[in-house]
Amino acid sequence: MIDKAVEYIKSKVDFVPEVAIILGSGLGNLTDGIENPIYVDYKDIENFPRSTAPGHIGRFVFGTLLGKKVVCMQGRFHFYEGYSMQQVVLPVRVLRKLGVEKLIVTNAAGGINTAFVPGDIMMITDHINFMGTNVLIGKNDDMLGPRFPDMSFAYNPDLRETARKCARELGIDIKEGVYLGCTGPSYETPAEIKAFRILGADAVGMSTVPEVIAANHCGMKVLAFSLITNMAAGILKQKLTEEEVLETGAKKGRELQKLIAKIIWEM
């Protein structure tokens, strides 16, 4: 499946992107600044999954951003959509085989840290895998990576320092914290959020962890951000909705887009 996807993409795109960006819910318009875009729809790639989550268009966008060759994923795949973990991370492995070495991951997340407010940008420093499984379970493919990959520096320290520098220069306040990944699709209960805070989580979401594990497994350098689109269950005593997530993503996504563009320029 990886080889067939790579072969198809190479028939449409004649360059190797320097950086790949995975766009979370409500952040799809991050591609607006890409010059000479080439669109590759997931549905046109043999055996490729389809994005079904709200706010996920379902395509790769290849092109140039501030002089750098990039590719964006407008739409990712989630375990809660009924896909296997292997399908969830298939795009990451395809991008690596295309030659991409650096990956920026974004997501919409619920804030657990009570110092956060909706609209905050959190740079992920580490994660907690609460999905009950791991994308690397099963026979290891040594062509992809080692049997037991080290996750000590899953979120690359050098890229994180570059992000801090860029945020300072742009005057953008970014938080830092630990992301906890759940399967979804139900939002977490107030009791679960209290437990996650005790575990050390600052934000919670339904993506990112499998992709980051797969990216580290195959040797990619990873930088990741959560856009805090709402406070998690029980904090503000109100119901959580997908509309709130998408609305905050649309409002604050431009700021995150500006930051990511600056980071890519500095890479």
Image (spheres, rainbow, N blue to C red):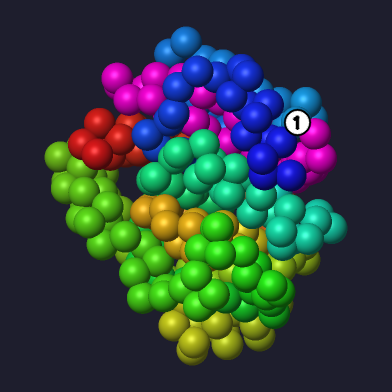
Decide whether residue 56 is among the magenta residues. yes
Q: Residue 201: give x, y in percent of width and height.
A: 47, 77
Magenta stretch: includes residue 208: no
Q: Is residue 70 above or below residue 49?
A: above
Q: Quadrant of residue 238?
A: bottom right
Q: Residues within 10 Å of mark 1 (few under 14, many from 20)?
A: some
Q: Looking at the picture, how far across and down is residue 110, in whole percent?
A: 56, 62
Does residue 231 appear anywhere in the picture? no
The magenta span reads 46-75
For the residue pair 130 and 200, the one nearer the viewer reads as: 130
- Residue 260, picture quadrant: top left
Residue 37 can be seen in this image: yes
**Which residue corresponds to mark 1?**
45
User: Can you name the residue that lies furthest to the top here?
Assistant: 36
Quadrant placement of the N terminus: top right
Left or right of 159? Residue 83 is right
The amino acid type of the residue labelled 1 equals: Ile
